[in-house]
Image (cartoon, rainbow, N blue to C red):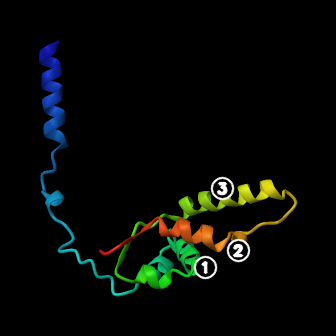
Amino acid sequence: MKKIIIILTAVVVLYSCDKDGNYLVDGGISSPEVGTTTMEFFKAHSQLDTLALLIEKAGMADLVNGNNTIFAPNNLSIKNYVNAILADMREIDPQAEYTINDIPLDTLTKYMGGYIFPEK
């Protein structure tokens, strides 16, 4: 029984090897320069465009475009954040119609600032 398992394992291992070696070919030398500002990059990508809107609303576009590092949360993360903030606001006044524009600027700046770090 052990011999059969060893033979089957050897056959699977040998069969799964890539014979043409394409796994060694990459796309070339990568460049960190994208030829655009960070905000333009965020706006151009569908998973980061809401982040760009919140950064502009918080008045932090110059900070993001500066010599800083930003860990960019995607749209799903931002949606969860906005829903949590608006849910807290609805507890105060359940009848009110709150939108993203009702989030206090200091709350938004604090949240966005948590993702921005000085220097590259």
- Picture residue at 44% right of the left edge, 81% below the top: 63
In the picture, measured across the screen, residue 2 lies left or right of residue 53, that is left
Q: Secondary structure at mark 2?
A: helix
Residue toward you, 83 or 92: 92
Q: Type of residue at label 1?
A: Lys
Q: For the image shown, how many numbered marks are present on the structure?
A: 3
Residue toward you, 28 or 13: 28
Using the image, tell me which numbered label, if any, was put on residue 57.
1
Please say if 68 is above or below 86: below
Q: Are marks 1 and 2 in contact (CB under 8 Å)?
A: yes
Residue toward you, 88 or 6: 88
From the image, which quarter does the C terminus lie in? bottom left
Q: Type of residue at label 3?
A: Ala
In the picture, measured across the screen, residue 73 lies left or right of residue 102, that is left
Image spot of residue 34 (x, y percent):
33, 82
In the picture, measured across the screen, residue 110 lies left or right of residue 26, that is right
Mark earlier in primary sequence (3, 2):
3
Mark 2 crowd level (few <14, some 14–19, many ≥20, 10 Å Cα): few
Using the image, tell me which numbered label, if any, was put on residue 101.
2
Mark 3 crowd level (few <14, some 14–19, many ≥20, 10 Å Cα): few
Residue 100 position by quadrant: bottom right
- Picture residue at 57% right of the left edge, 63% below the top: 78
Residue toward you, 56 or 34: 56
Q: Rounded to the nearest whole Å, what is the CA distance between mark 1 and mark 2?
A: 8 Å
Q: Which residue is mark 3?
A: 84
Q: Type of residue at label 2?
A: Asn
